[in-house]
Image: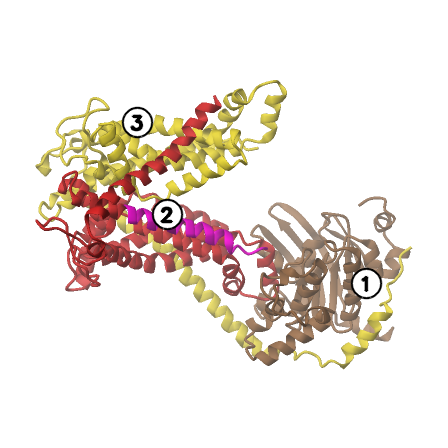
Chain colours: A red, B brown, C yellow
Amino acid sequence: MPIFFLGMASVSIFTTFGIAATLIVDAFRFFSEVPVGQVFSTNLAPLRAQPSFGILPLINATIIVTLIAMLVAIPIGLSAAIFLSQFASPRLRKVLKPVLEVLAGIPTIVYGFFAYSFVTPLLMKLIPDLGAKNALSPGIVMGIMIIPMVASLSEDAMNAVPIILKDGALALGSTKLEVAFRVIIPSAISGIIASFVLAVSRAIGETMIVTIASGSSKVLTFDIKQSMQTMTSYIVEFTSGDAASGTTGYYSLYAVALILFIFTLGMNLLAQYISKRFREEY
Amino acid sequence: MINEEKVLSKPIFSVNDLSLWYGEEQALKKINLSIANNQVTAIIGPSGCGKSTFIKTLNRMVENIPIVKVDGDILYHQKSVFSNEMSVEELRTRVGMVFQKPNPFPKSIYENVVYGPKIHGIKDKYLLMEIAENSLKRAALWDEVKDRLKKNALSLSGGQQQRLCIARALAVSPDVLLMDEPTSALDPIATGRIEDLILDLKQEYTIVIVTHSMQQAARISDKTAFFLMGELIEYDDTQKIFSNPTNKKTEDYITGRFG
Amino acid sequence: MFTQRQPSIRKKASIGKLDLIEAAPKLNIEINRNRIARRLILNNSMRIVFLIATSLGIVILAILLYRIITDSIGWLNLDFLRGNLSIFPERAGIKGVIIGSVWLMLIVIPVTLVLGVSTAIYLEEYAAESRFQTLIKVNISNLASVPSVIFGLLGLAVFGRMLNLGSSILSGGLTLSLLVLPIIVVASQEAIKAVPGFLREASYAMGADKWMTVRKVVLPVALPGILTGSILAMSRAIGETAPLVVLGIPTLILRIPNSVMDDFTALPIQIYYWTLDTVLTREYANLAAATIVVLLAILFGMNAIAIIIRNKFETKF
């Protein structure tokens, strides 16, 4: 019987290898066909007769959308965590926490719909030259989607600070705000930063919201009012049948996927490292 | 004798009919007690008698527990601690507390001591350093740490950490120091040093100490209160409590018949 | 018996020292009253700011639900639920779509239960504290963070191409199973860990071997936790879009799938395709909204069942 369980448990290892192998093999084909100079150029035109595969526009778009998402998720998520762990009464917590959990459980496609059919038209009224496909709308909605993650992980980190430290600070006449900022947050900082890193990783890997709301423009731009294609939505575009199997275009998506995989894996290992390395000894 | 009368006429704390409930369970039953200035008042009693709960009412720390209900009054310098006149932050600045398990912040020794002055808005580095030095000297810790103020407080031994917590409490110039079994987590030598310190400190501060050790109460306190099951059984001069108590229950506890 | 303590001679000298030290400047209470008042005002205003930030979540959720429900009014009715897909919005129904999602779950549930629970059993009962356990744990944790698109690529390569399952239900179901595997592994691990040691010891004491103990003692007690984990995994799988898009699930399916090898479509995919085309065909937005309501209703139902299971059947030790 144990052999059976061992076999089943190994499936997870095979999955990781499978992912790595799938990505590396076809990415390798891509890199062997396309000169490195072109890959790191800003010219992305995979469907032309003479295609060019500069992937910098994709990386740029991913970074921009992620940045916007973090500007939304981190302040609001951290504030929610501070409120729930330091200020809220148990009754208030019982009401607010489940709501955040519901937000976390909504499928991303629903957020994608929300971004495209509600947020974008709304923003277009406020910002006159905002494109129908732009980076701002999905960035904001992505940030909203990630708030519960930041809030819950940061709250866990803050609640892990021993109560006697909180009591000690209160007994010295601190206000709750002072306890939160002078004792709790400094003590929990590694967990809090780890939650930020995980949030970035989530944003980088998010697909549907950007595919729907940000479009597929492959021009490198910093203008968030315009369309731009992220790494994830490039992969979706090309597997939806735009490139025949075996072409360089087809392999390009594996190259992009490999870079994506390395980014997110790196972020996750970083989060684990931060969590462990800088944990305060209480 | 005359001094004592003068002092007793204006007690620092007057506790009037204080009752406390944890939800449905009553933990303190109509406590009446006065605590005099510049004395060490010890609170003794068996586990669960309410002595820790009682001391935490004096600086309103007991309110941090959500299901707590309080009835009766506590007067600090003749003013109710529950009135709007004095915020709980001000009360806790003037009535300091040291806990059973030493709880220095995971910061440097210096940062621990100046935590209080800093939140009171003192920014001047020289002033802060002066306060730190004075507080650490008063807590009999200065000589041991003066060369390593920037080191992490957690690198100190248990006894040193506790003296650091005392220094931290003293740094905001309280007039009362509440101590909740401050030496129960320490070895005998560290305990002895802190008991010496308490005898020094009573010249300038009023000290209320909860202790599970009758010997400790007898060694260092001027007055002793005996609590049993949430009630104050007897409160008198320490000499009297330990040699000639009035109440039979007190005598039973002192002689070790229970607890 | 008890003697008053005399300060030791060593201390007497330092008492003298204390006398000579200037008293620390007593913090001026009057100034502090103002400062304390200011600190309290700051405290209370920041509390409100943080409360608003937390409530922002509720507000946004409310707006989101409101918009989606209003968009779906008039379009979400029995005909919609029972009809077949059509390129003409007025005639489109999602019966086939719902059935497609159900088929997917019929694959995901058994596969994840077997794989996930086995992995958890292995980690907790057979390999505790070994290097192999750490390896698998790290693996699971890393897999949990891989973007779902990449799982789609894996599925395309292994199930779609290598095993030649194309874009069938089996292909989609297996891909989604791998995606949500970490969820059920972690939940099962927690449930198995929570089974108290004394129950296991009692079983061993009666002569049972490990597998029998697991089967007769550990699993039954851990079952509510495992089921909750399974429902969580399903909730995630039923809403996942990206892997299915990558696998090549088609835009329009006219026939209802009959077997696991058939082509299919699922709720999230349908929402996606309709949302993409809303500019050209306005009514698609309403169809998408109506489908979202159905999806959210199913999710709500699943989570309600999970909560009921947890409250009713979990034994507290």
Q: How far apart are marks 1 and 3 (CA)?
A: 75 Å
Find the distance from the CA under tag 3 to the CA under tag 2.
28 Å
Any part of residue B137 in sight:
yes
Q: Which mark is residue A265?
A: 2
Asked if the stretch drawn in magenta spans residue C160, the answer is no
Q: Where is residue B98 in the image (x, y as percent from the top left)?
A: 68, 61
Q: Is the magenta stretch mostly helix, strand or loop?
A: helix
| Tag 2: amino acid | Leu
| Segment colored magenta | A258-282
Q: For this rendering, which residue is in front, B143 or A248?
A: A248
> What's the amino acid at mark 3?
Ile
Q: Give the labeled residue for mark 1.
A: B221
Specify whether B194 is left or right of C270: right
Identify which amino acid the numbered label 1 is placed on.
Ser
* Rendered image: mark on residue A258: none
Q: Do the residues labelled 1 and 3 touch (CB within 8 Å)?
A: no
Within the image, what quadrant is residue C95 found in? top left
Element class at badge 1: loop
**How much space separates mark 1 and mark 2, taking CA atoms?**
62 Å
